[in-house]
Image (cartoon, coloured by chain):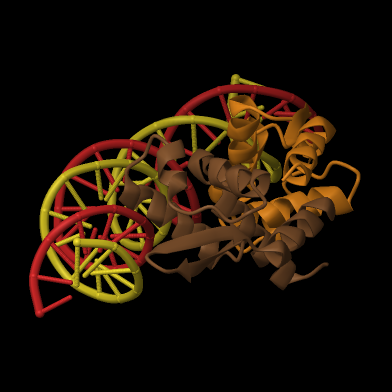
Chain colours: A brown, B orange, C red, D yellow
DNA sequence: TTCCGACATCGTAATAGAACGATGACCCGG
DNA sequence: CCGGGTCATCGTTCTATTACGATGTCGGAA
């Protein structure tokens, strides 16, 4: 849990979460254990393209994942990433 | 632990930590339980003014505090802020 | 095949972040 | 009182982020 890699990981993960809209998205996905889809857009006061951007950031950080389900995309928490975030923050 | 305030707090705290240099600073201050001072500058490959800026960000987020000790300043972890960060991340 | 709805991506504008050197404020030993 | 050392702040440059509308892509219903 030490070392430069861990530091970089922690910085990357916290940076991904370091935005109110992205925190809201994470909470939304955690609350509904089921993967929701673009309902997220309706829950946030942001344009669809902006939400899509935030989802991309969270996905690239490994905090969420999205599965294509027909015409829509189903996002849900990536347990591995969330666990790693918790572990790294806990190590402080 | 719910609500918009918590979301905003979590975003603010993680944003403050969302930078490799600031993660290193936090780790440094956690490791040495004693408050170190501008030794931080010597540990990081950054200019003094840049480190000072990062320290300001962490301080404004409530993650560290600095006490004036004669001609130097002594920084140490603010347990309250760190605890709140851990609690908020843990609530996800 | 053609269209519609759901997402993603592009292009762009405005704002914020990171880094540096130079300068300013401050305490303390001479 | 003067200088040196320690930090903070200022001004600047470059890059990244955030947000939007417009456009592109791709299933599936008609």
Q: Which of A61 and B2 is in front in this view?
A: B2
Q: Where is residue B78 in the image (x, y as percent from the top left)?
A: 80, 34
The answer to whether residue C1 is left or right of residue D28 is: left
Q: Nearer the viewer, residue B35 or B24?
A: B24
| Location of residue A65 (image quadrant) | bottom right
Q: Where is residue D12 in the image (x, y as percent from the top left)?
A: 29, 46
The answer to whether residue B52 is left or right of residue A49 is: right
Q: Position of residue A40 (x, y in %)?
A: 47, 46
Position of the N terminus of chain B, as image quadrant, is top right
Q: Where is residue A31 in the image (x, y as percent from the top left)?
A: 66, 43
Q: Residue at x 65, y 66 (%)?
A: A8
- Residue A86 can be seen, yes or no: yes
Q: Which residue is drawn at 55% across and 40% down?
A: A24
Q: Which residue is drawn at 41% across and 39% down?
A: A42
| Location of residue B37 (image quadrant) | top right
- Residue B48 can be seen, yes or no: no
Farthest-out residue, right:
B33
From this view, report whether residue B79 is shown above or below residue A60: above
Q: Which residue is drawn at 70% across and 31% down?
A: B62
The answer to whether residue A29 is left or right of residue D19 is: right
Q: How many marks?
A: 0
From this view, report whether residue A52 is shown above or below residue A39: below
| Location of residue B2 (image quadrant) | top right
């Amino acid at each position: 849990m030490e070392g430069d890699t861990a530091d970089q990981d922690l910085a990357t993960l916290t940076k991904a979460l370091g935005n109110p809209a992205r925190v809201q998205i994470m909470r939304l996905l955690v609350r509904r254990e089921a993967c929701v889809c673009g309902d997220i857009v309706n829950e946030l006061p942001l344009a669809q393209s902006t939400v899509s951007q935030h989802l991309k950031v969270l996905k690239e950080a490994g905090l969420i994942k999205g599965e294509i389900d027909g015409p829509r995309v189903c996002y849900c928490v990536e347990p591995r990433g969330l666990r790693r975030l918790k572990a790294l923050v806990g190590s402080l």
